[in-house]
């Protein structure tokens, strides 16, 4: 989950062109000795709370009684999902035929030959940034399915009451807006996800990019010894020191932060697009329904840079039924299935047309804002040893956020640690 993508019209962004050891541990033979054969398959994916994903799978199964798909839920946390998929791949388990990969895992799974190159997939219609997250060394290894970028949720009612016309575009504006609102309201200013897990890598990378820096340079080498990288990390560490960011945010993952925003405890909140529908519920679960909106993230001297998120789908190298796996990937990433899933789940999808589809925009009014964020988004650091890279980032950043190291010490140590991990 590569390269900074140039700013351009979104319409121009289309590319025209569970550790389970069941089954055989060898992955090169199909059910009748044909590794490209057809037959029932298993899809290992994250647990989707609305039930819409199972409806999408049911649609396939109704039309393909001899090649049904069994959906297997992976653990909730991204780190645990990756661990289970890696462990399965390392023992060459045939338990999974199709796997859902966080967009940043492509290089690791492709380089280790744990997933197959995908050929014959019509790439037209996908968002270019989303499509690129599935590529490794010029080949497509994972088909774009879900996408997304970080968004700034903000309280429209409190900004209006304080005489503020719109959301902040810079960190200084965010700080000033909070000070104005706090003159009459006791509320936390801002929070993202700062617990020591994958979300911290996302938030720290986002802050560094939004300050004009980079974790890795264009050649894939660490680039943390710059004033811009330091400014990005300092925005977070200083925020925790001066109260801009509540101390409780050191325990926030996505759901903790979402609940805090919905409870009216935060003026500004960084999170993903899925929060929009939940925070807007009028069943009493959200205290901010009808009183918030979203905007692109602010940055050091102008609009910030979001981290490109998303999930792609890939064919396990050890699948017995790779033909069915490919056919199913074409189905689940197709326009009809993506629209069905998007409408029912509020997850942002990888197909460009859905961002201007009237039914989609009516159901998810934040889509035009999200489209802007996606076209300017930057992936997390791409590395074959991504698990080691993200662990190093989390350890260093968390030490700085907790005041156990200065930002300078944290970045200096991380610069040295990432060198061997990203060596080509």
Image (cartoon, helix red, strand yellow):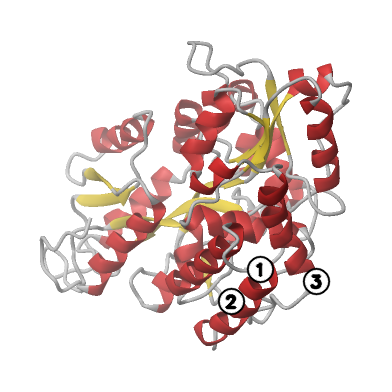
Please tell me in which quadrant of the rendered image residue 265 appears: top right
- Image quadrant in which the C terminus is located: bottom right
Please rate how many residues cluster around mark 3, counting C-alpha atoms within 10 Å: few if below 14, some from 14 to 19, many from 20. Answer: few
The label on residue 406 is 1
Quick one: label 3 or label 1, which is nearer the N terminus?
Answer: 3
Please rate how many residues cluster around mark 1, counting C-alpha atoms within 10 Å: few if below 14, some from 14 to 19, many from 20. Answer: some
Helix, strand or loop for disc 2? helix
Please provide percent x and percent y for residue 362. 63, 20
Quick one: label 1 or label 2, which is nearer the N terminus?
Answer: 1
Above or below, 56 against 390 in this view is above
Helix, strand or loop for disc 3? helix
Residue ID at (60%, 61%): 403
Please provide percent x and percent y for residue 354. 60, 35
- Image quadrant in which the N terminus is located: bottom right
Above or below, 423 against 371 in this view is below
How many tags in the picture?
A: 3
> Where does label 2 land, which residue?
414
Quick one: label 3 or label 2, which is nearer the N terminus?
Answer: 3
Tell which of 77 and 159 is nearer to you.
Answer: 159
Residue ID at (36%, 35%): 53
């Amino acid at each position: 989950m590569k390269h900074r993508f140039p700013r351009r019209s979104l319409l121009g962004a289309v590319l025209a062109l569970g550790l389970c050891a069941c089954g055989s541990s060898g992955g090169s033979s199909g059910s009748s000795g044909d590794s490209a054969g057809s037959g029932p398959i298993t899809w290992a994916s994250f647990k989707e709370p609305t039930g819409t994903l199972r409806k999408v799978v049911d649609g396939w199964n109704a039309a393909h009684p001899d090649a049904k798909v069994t959906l297997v839920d992976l653990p909730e946390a991204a780190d645990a999902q990756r661990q289970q998929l890696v462990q399965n791949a390392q023992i060459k388990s045939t338990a999974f035929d199709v796997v859902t990969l966080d967009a940043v895992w492509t290089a690791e799974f492709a380089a280790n030959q744990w997933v197959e190159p995908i050929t014959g997939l019509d790439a037209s219609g996908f968002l270019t940034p989303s499509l690129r997250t599935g590529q490794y060394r010029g080949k497509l290894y994972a088909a774009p399915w879900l996408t997304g970028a970080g968004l700034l949720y903000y309280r429209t009612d409190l900004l209006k009451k304080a005489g503020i016309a719109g959301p902040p575009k810079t960190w200084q504006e965010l700080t000033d807006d909070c000070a104005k609102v706090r003159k009459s309201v006791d509320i936390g200013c801002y929070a993202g996800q700062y617990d020591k897990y994958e979300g911290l890598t996302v938030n720290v990378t986002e802050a560094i990019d939004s300050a004009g820096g980079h974790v890795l340079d264009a050649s894939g080498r660490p680039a943390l010894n710059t004033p811009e990288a330091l400014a990005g990390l300092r925005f977070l560490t200083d925020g925790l020191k001066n109260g801009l960011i509540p101390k409780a945010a050191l325990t926030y993952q996505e759901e903790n932060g979402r609940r805090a925003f919905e409870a009216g405890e935060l003026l500004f909140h960084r999170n993903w697009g899925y929060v929009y529908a939940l925070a807007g519920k009028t069943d009493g679960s959200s205290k901010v329904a009808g009183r918030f909106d979203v905007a692109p993230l602010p940055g050091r001297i102008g609009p910030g840079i979001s981290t490109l998120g998303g999930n792609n789908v890939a064919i396990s190298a050890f699948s017995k039924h790779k033909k069915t796996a490919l056919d199913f990937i074409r189905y689940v990433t197709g326009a009809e299935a993506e629209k069905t899933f998007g409408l029912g789940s509020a997850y942002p999808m990888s197909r460009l047309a859905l961002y201007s589809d009237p039914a989609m925009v009516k159901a998810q009014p934040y889509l035009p804002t999200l489209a802007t964020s996606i076209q300017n988004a930057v992936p997390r650091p791409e590395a074959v040893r991504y698990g080691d890279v993200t662990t190093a980032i989390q350890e260093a950043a968390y030490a700085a956020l907790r005041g156990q190291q200065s930002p300078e010490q944290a970045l200096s140590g991380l610069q040295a640690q990432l060198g061997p991990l990203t060596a080509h």
